[in-house]
Image (spheres, rainbow, N blue to C red):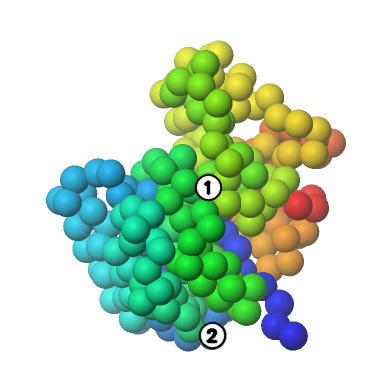
Amino acid sequence: MNKPGRLALVGSGEYLPVMQEFERELIARGPSMRYVQLATAAGRESEVRRGYWERIGKEQAERIGAEQIFIPVYNREDAMREDLAAMVDGAGLIYLSGGDPHYLAETLRDTPVWAAIERNWRAGSSLAGCSAGAMALGPDIPNFRKMKAEGSIGLGVLPNIRTIPHYNKFFGWIPDAAAQLFLKAPDHITVTGIDEDTALWSDDLATWNVSGKGATHLLSGSKTGKFHHGETLTFEI
């Protein structure tokens, strides 16, 4: 029986040269050089912006010697298409890039495309989420832009980890009250902050490793602290 592939939570930098070697390592862990990219989190942005994600994804794939498989899933109708779901099969790396994490989770949940992503990851494909993609992989996504609104249900791959991407800049962007909302989590949820150009990754969802220019911050639980490139930390999902 295959075990799940490598899983990565990235603070920022998807498809950019700064994360080139890290993405090369991710795809090398998978069963092929098929680099599956979904810009679903940017689905409500302009056509020009969606084209930007496809372009820089192509450039990164070329830099690391991979085959770009850009899947145009921008809404629920797209995510329900079996032909687009089939494009995920055999991926070496599946990458959910940035945008709106609430929209990403709501668009993919309970669809053939998400079923294909989860199935391939459980069969050995690497799975990465950057910024919105990292947030959506958790159990929930607090609504820090609308304090009185309820948050969204996440995709639940990591049912006990809530991720704050862009952590080294995040609290300069939102009010203190919103920051406290994000940090206030049930006891079973570990809140992690991941700096820009930095990733937290695991092969077994128990031992986690830090890669990149910044740090990962454990903000709740019994093992709070700041961890840098090359360091490992252990917590169960």
Is 137 rendered above or below residue 190? below
The residue shown at (48%, 15%) is 175
> 78 or 147: which is nearer to us?
78
Is 174 rendered above or below residue 109? above
Disc 1 residue type?
Ala
The residue shown at (70%, 83%) is 2
Mark 2 touches mark 1? (CB < 8 Å): no
> 35 or 47: which is nearer to us?
47
> 201 or 114: which is nearer to us?
114
Task: Identify residue for label 1.
Answer: 136
Question: What's the distance in space between the residues labelled 2 and 1, CA to CA?
Answer: 24 Å
Give the structural element (helix, strand or loop) at label 1. helix
Residue 194: image quadrant is top right
Q: Position of residue 32 (x, y in %)?
A: 48, 85
Q: Residues within 10 Å of mark 1 (few under 14, many from 20)?
A: many
Q: Is residue 117 left or right of residue 237?
A: left
The residue shown at (54%, 37%) is 152
Q: Position of residue 185 (x, y in %)?
A: 71, 30
Q: Position of residue 140 (x, y in %)?
A: 61, 39
Task: Identify residue for label 2.
Answer: 31
Q: Quadrant of the N terminus?
A: bottom right
Residue 18 in sight: no
Q: Which numbered disc, 2 or 1, marks the residue that appears first in the sequence? A: 2
Q: Residues within 10 Å of mark 2 (few under 14, many from 20)?
A: some
Is 204 rendered above or below residue 110? below
Q: Is residue 96 left or right of residue 235?
A: left
Q: Position of residue 61 (x, y in %)?
A: 33, 73
Q: Residue furthest left?
A: 48
Disc 2 residue type?
Pro
Give the structural element (helix, strand or loop) at label 2. loop
Q: Is residue 58 left or right of residue 1?
A: left
Count of marks, rendered view? 2
